[in-house]
Amino acid sequence: MTSTIAPVSAISAPAAEALRSPSMRSVELPGPAGRLEGVVNEGAPDAPFAALVCHPHPLGGGNLHNKVVYHAMKALSDSQWGLEWPVLRFNFRGTERSQGIHDGEAEADDVLAAMDWLEREYRRPLVVLGFSFGAAMALDACCGKPAGRSKVRALAALGLPTQANGREYLYTCLTSCTIPKLFLSGDRDQFAPAQDLVRVTGSAAEPKHLMLLPGADHFFTGQLEPMQFALSGWLKEQLQ
């Protein structure tokens, strides 16, 4: 693992998203607890990968329009960042128009369902990202469940929580997960002290990379562009 200090509260996506560009479409996914609401940003027709971005905790207001999720999507789909992949965002069960009831752990199966949809729709290798709760569910789906490991070429965890509401979060599935992994957080993340992230990433199987953005909190407040730069740069190094 290489630990790096990258150079240099966001909830709602920019209002411009409401305009719905021609490259964006709404979709419905078959999920294990019912229909899941999703949005796809198409990217380039010849893109070599398709990507999934998972949102933060719905009980804290998280949904597919979360600002960190939105900016992560832009880093993967917009030409200015040099990737132009199709990107799916979706709402976990019980969130907005997605059917089902929030569980807190079974949402990892929602991630698998979204991956299955992406694979059927685009027929190309997958990259999976998650922010906060979405990062935890993405790790569980891609590293903790056999059905997820074979589908994913790279995995990024943004703002991965290590402690919240008096609970410590452990990620034992990482010890045998050989998917290339990026752990990208702020060095002032209130839900993941830097020493905790070093411990978590230290226990993870290679290949892996830890980046801490100086001065950034859990929501990358004022640091969304550096987050995009770090994310897109790592993916280019891994996959291009």
Image (cartoon, rainbow, N blue to C red):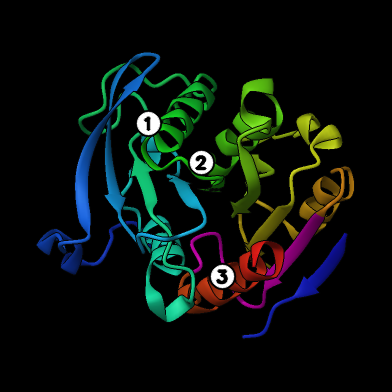
- From mark 1 to mark 2, how far is it between C-alphas? 9 Å
Q: Amino acid at mark 1?
A: Phe
Task: List x then y, in percent, for residue 9.
Answer: 40, 62
Residue at horizontal 51 percent and vertical 72 percent from the top: 228
- From mark 1 to mark 3, how far is it between C-alphas? 25 Å
Task: List x then y, in percent, for residue 145.
Answer: 67, 22
Task: List x then y, in percent, for residue 73.
Answer: 41, 60
Q: Amino acid at mark 2?
A: Gly
Magenta stretch bounds: 208-220
Give the left or right position of residue 130, taking residue 87 as reference.
right
Residue at horizontal 43 percent and vertical 60 percent from the top: 85
Q: Residue furthest left?
A: 19
Residue at horizontal 41 percent and vertical 55 percent from the top: 69
Examine the rendered structure and indicate whether residue 203 appears above or below residue 76: above
Nearer-the-camera pick, 42 or 101: 42
Give the left or right position of residue 225, taking residue 232 as reference.
left
Q: Which residue is mark 3?
A: 232
Between discs 1 and 3, the one toward the N terminus: 1
Residue at horizontal 67 percent and vertical 32 percent from the top: 150
Q: Secondary structure at mark 2?
A: helix
The 10 Å Cα crowd at callout 1, few under 14, some 14 to 19, many 20 or more, is: many
Q: Which residue is mark 2?
A: 134
Q: Residue furthest front?
A: 46
Examine the rendered structure and indicate whether residue 167 appears above or below residue 145: below
Q: Secondary structure at mark 1?
A: loop
Image quarter in which the C terminus is found = bottom right
Give the left or right position of residue 194, taking residue 97 as reference.
right
Q: Amino acid at mark 3?
A: Ser
Q: Which residue is mark 1?
A: 92
Which mark's residue is nearer the viewer, 1 or 3?
3
Between discs 2 and 3, the one toward the N terminus: 2
Which mark's residue is nearer the viewer, 2 or 3?
3
